[in-house]
Image (cartoon, rainbow, N blue to C red):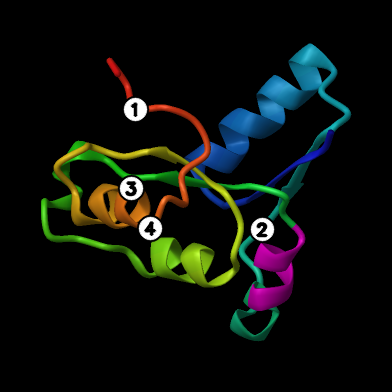
Amino acid sequence: MRVLVVTEGIGADWLAEAKAREGLDNLILLPFQPFADVPNAIGTGAALVVLLEPDAGVYSVPSKTLAYLCADRPLLGAIPLNNLAAKLITRERRGAGRRAGG
């Protein structure tokens, strides 16, 4: 299995260091992609990962979550359960996995 991560900044730096340190040859790191290429990038995944911080807000559904839902792929989410994105993923039965503590 390959893990593709599209990110920049300190997260990308941390992942690059971990990749080198641990010899993670299956970890592919790419910088942010041009907007026109985003559908192709999302479409390559067998499953997509959504991370939302607790301060994202109860009523926040970031565009990446909506785009991932449109891609018709299972979602692996680390999202506060009271967030609207988590409720939407649960309602649409699009999550892959189980709820924390459940």
Rendered view: 40 above or below 3: below
Q: Badge 1 is on which residue?
A: 99
What numbered label is drawn on residue 31?
2
Which image quadrant for residue 31?
A: bottom right
Q: Amino acid at mark 3?
A: Thr
* In the displayed structure image, the side of residue 57 where residue 38 appears, left or right: right
Residue 26 is left or right of residue 30, and the answer is: right
Mark pair 4, 2: CA separation: 30 Å
Find disc 4 in the rendering and name its residue. Answer: 92
Kind of element beneath mark 3: helix
The residue that appears at 59% across and 65% down in the rendered structure is 72
Picture disc at residue 90: 3
Q: Residue at x 34, y 27 (%)?
A: 99
- Marks 4/1: CA distance? 14 Å
Label 3 with label 4: CB-CB less than 8 Å: yes
Instruction: Name the image quarter holding residue 52.
Output: top left
Tell me which residue sits at (85%, 18%) in the image.
Answer: 23
Foreground residue among 51 and 88: 88
Left or right, 41 with reference to 93: right
Which label sits in the foreground, 3 or 2?
A: 3
- Do labels 4 and 1 touch, CB within 8 Å? no
Circle 2: element type? loop
Per the rendering, the mark at residue 8 is none
Dividing the image into 4 quarters, which one contains the C terminus? top left
Neighbor class of circle 4 (other Cα within 10 Å; few <14, some 14-19, many 20+) is few
Sequence-wise, which precedes: disc 2 or disc 1?
Answer: 2
Q: Which residues are magenta?
A: 39-44
